[in-house]
Structures are given as C-alpha cells and as structure tokens.
Image: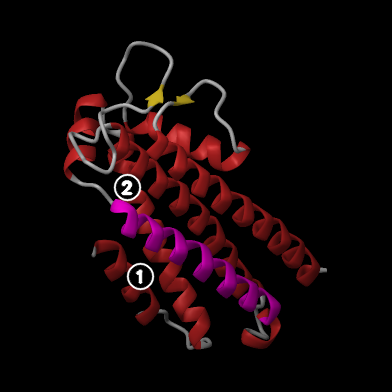
Amino acid sequence: MIAGSAGIAAALVLPVAPAGVIRAMLGWDVGALTLLALTWHFILRSPPERTRYAAAVEDPGRAAVGASVLVSSVVSLVAAAWVIDGAKRLSPAAPGVPITFAVVAVVSGWFLTHTTYALRYAHLYYSDGDQEAGPDGGLEFPGATPPAALDFAYFSFVLGMTFQVSDVAVSSPVIRRVALWHGLTAFWFNVAILALTLNVLGSLI
C-alpha cells in the first residue's frame, strides 16, 4: 500500500505535462523503488530468528510470487521497450528523460523479481508445517548458523545471475521446482535486458 501510494503520488504531482506513458512509468519507478527499499530494510535487519518468524507467518504465496514476477517482468520490459523506441517522439526536447525512466523500470523490475523469490525461498525453508512446503529445510547452507533473510537473498540473486549457487544444495522437491521457474524467468529477463541495452545504445548514437 505504501509503495503503491508513493507511485501514484509521483505520477500525479509530476510538475510537467509529459505523455501519459512517461507519467505512468515514473509512477512505476517510484512505487517499485519504494517497495524495494521497504523490503530490503527488512532483509538487512532480520537475523535468523526474525526471519523464521516472519517467513512462517507472512508467505507471499505462489499466487503473489507469480503475479509479482509477471507484473515486474512484463510491464517493465514491454513499457521500457516501447518508451525507448519512441523516446524522441514522446519527449522531443529531452529524449534522455523517458529513456532514463525506462532503464530504471527495467532495473527495478529485475530486482523485484529476485527479491520476491528470496522471500518465497525463506517461507519454503521455514515452512512451519505448511502442507505445500513440507518439513523445514530444503536448502543446505554451509555452516551451522540458521539462514537469515540475507542468505535467501544471496541464494535468489546468485541463482538469477549465474543460474547456479555452488555452495548451497537444494534438497527439497518443492524448492527445486520454484528454482526451476526462477531460472527460466531470470534467463529471458537477462536476455531482454541485453536487447534493451543495445536498443538504448542505438537510440543515443
């Protein structure tokens, strides 16, 4: 609610009168960055005990994960591609402005995707008797200390960037299936980012 309100406010109070898509993209950027800031405030300040409690009580759930990934991936990438392609038409005086908004949308969407998966992995690990997840565990981190929220973020982001995590073993079939979809999502997202990067460079030449 906070992130959504921040995004709507940013879109409405923009002091200039650009095309509606630019205003909407600014709202998306502010909302996504606000959500990331709030979520990472929790991740960075959560030891294993707090992570276990929060993950067991507040599960983003399969539906929420799917919706978040779908929205952050499709909306940011499609809108960014459209804005970059028509930047000079949307903002003839300053085409760099919509391009900047588009790049921020893609980057924030990428971070949101992997952050959402990090929360999902935390719930599946600290399932607290969840019938879907099975018994606690499923990820074998090195060391004897129970994993904190930052450990699940490490697993999620490294998997999203390199499609493997050499020092963490997956022993749960449920987490293995989630990791499979995570890897597939990360692959096409990374390919799309590469294509958009080349598009941005081409538009600036």
Which residue lies under the disc numbered 2? 39
Q: Residue most toward the top?
A: 144
Residue 97 in view: no
Q: Amino acid at mark 2?
A: Thr
Q: Which residues are magenta?
A: 61-86
Q: Residue at x 21, y 40 (%)?
A: 130
Is residue 68 one of those drawn in magenta?
yes
Q: Residue at x 42, y 26 (%)?
A: 171
| For residue 29, side relative to residue 54 (left or right) | right
Secondary structure at badge 1 equals helix
Residue 92 in view: yes
Q: What x and y, as percent, mark residue 149? A: 33, 33
Query: Along the line of sight, which residue is nearer the eye, 120 or 196?
Result: 120
Q: What x and y, as percent, mark residue 23? A: 46, 80
Which residue lies under the disc numbered 1? 7
Query: Along the line of sight, which residue is nearer the eye, 82 or 34?
Result: 82
Secondary structure at badge 2 equals helix
Q: What x and y, as percent, mark residue 82? A: 63, 78
Q: Dividing the picture into quarters, in which one does residue 65 lie?
A: bottom left
| For residue 83, side relative to residue 126 (left or right) | right
Q: CA distance from mark 1 to mark 2?
A: 16 Å
Q: Is residue 143 above or below residue 133?
A: above
Q: What x and y, as percent, mark residue 142? A: 43, 15
Q: Dividing the picture into quarters, in which one does residue 46 lie?
A: top left
Q: Nearer the viewer, mark 1 or mark 2?
A: 2
Is residue 104 one of those drawn in magenta?
no
Q: Amino acid at mark 1?
A: Gly
Nearest to N terminus: mark 1 or mark 2: 1
Which mark is drawn over residue 80?
A: none
Mainly helix, strand or loop, the magenta region?
helix
Q: Dividing the picture into quarters, in which one does residue 5 lie?
A: bottom left
